[in-house]
Amino acid sequence: MGTDVEAIYQLMIERLNDFRQKRPYIEEIVTFCEKVLEAQREVQAEISVPPVRLDRAHMAVKTREGFPVLSREDFPVDRERSAKLLERLCRIGLGENPVLADGSKRLLEAMESGGVNLEGLFAAVVNDDEAGLEALAGELKIPPPVLKALAKLGLQPSLSASAAAATREVSLDGWNRPHCPVCGALPAMAALVGEEGRRHGLCSFCGTVYRLPRVGCPFCGTENPDDLRYFYGEDEDLYRVQVCDRCSGYLKILDTRKGGSVEALAVEDILTAHLDLVAEEQGYERKAPRLWGI
Ligand SMILES: [Zn+2]
Ligand SMILES: [Zn+2]
């Protein structure tokens, strides 16, 4: 992989260290994230996805019209390395909370005995096939969210590699839409970037960072100020949460002018779970999953 993806790992690890200093009470989750990142980072270097060959002229038209560059069905995935990473993630999971530990143990046993259809599992996650995932989870006796999270974490380096390859082929400079230009998924979290605070989103599926429309709810598209308001985190103006009364969605937004970086939003999203709770207590719901699926 190019240096870009490697640099993102570095930024995420640095950010985890900031959190460790600032909020010692979340040490456990910080350490878990570090272990996951280390495992992903190692595999990232070996990832080999089929080359993304795109007809540039055709793609330029597609992105101008707001269509994503890649469709989910042919999102290139390195199954072999994803499987290897999944096994390692299960070993990490064994030492975590009882639900994750039990799911990890069952999946590990199934992988060792050849009793799991990994191709089907990865396809279900990539294609957002909830019914397929539930069927596999039922066979394995693992709660579907646990199975999905483990598989998504295992696939992530592969998805990042494919997304990086696609964005090298097509210019996304003019992109200004709520969904991801690479895969079409909605943002997991957002950040204000640069002096003017331009709004960028982190794609909840492939991890691409892209320009979001300056205003409005990315989930229903309303720009009506009567539908939208913000609340702020208790300890800092580093975070704000945009809530929408039209679709009941909310979006956590990091102000990178005050700290953090847009590249590390995946871990930022996990470590600001308290803001999700506040939004949910007020009756709002998460419309796009975390990039890590946990
Ligand atoms: Zn995407
Ligand atoms: Zn909305």
Image (spheres, rainbow, N blue to C red):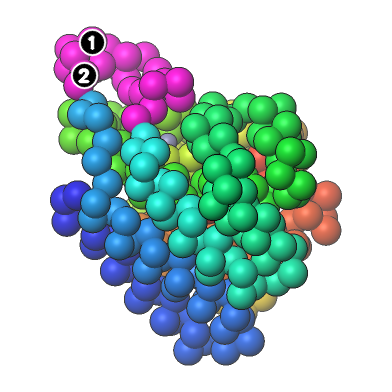
- The stretch drawn in magenta includes residue 73: yes
Residues drawn in magenta: 53-76
Q: Left or right of 111: which side holds 16?
A: left
Q: Left or right of 104: which side holds 193?
A: left
Please say if the residues under marks 2 and 1 sit with CB atoms less than 8 Å apart.
Answer: yes
- The stretch drawn in magenta includes residue 236: no
Task: Identify which amino acid the numbered label 1 is placed on.
Answer: His
Alpha carbon distance from label 2 to label 1:
8 Å
Residue 118 coordinates in the image, percent (x, y): 52, 38
Residue 281 coordinates in the image, percent (x, y): 83, 58
**Foreground: 286 or 174?**
286
Write down the residue under mark 2: 54
**Foreground: 221 or 18?**
18
Residue 89 appears in the figure: yes
**Foreground: 270 or 244?**
270
Mark 1: C-beta under 8 Å from nearest atom of ligand 1: no
Residue located 78% across and 54% down the image: 280
Residue located 43% across and 81% down the image: 18
On-image quarter of the C terminus: bottom right
Residue 79 coordinates in the image, percent (x, y): 39, 38
Q: Left or right of 7: which side holds 237?
A: right
In this view, 132 is above or below 234: above
In this view, 255 is above or below 119: below
Residue 164 appears in the figure: no
Mark 2: C-beta under 8 Å from nearest atom of ligand 1: no
Task: Identify which amino acid the numbered label 2 is placed on.
Answer: Leu
Residue 36 coordinates in the image, percent (x, y): 46, 65
- Labelled disc at residue 277: none
**Which picture quadrant has residue 278?**
bottom right
Residue located 55% across and 61% down the image: 90
Write down the residue under mark 1: 58
Query: Neighbour class for label 1 at 10 Å: few (<14), some, many (≥20)?
Result: few
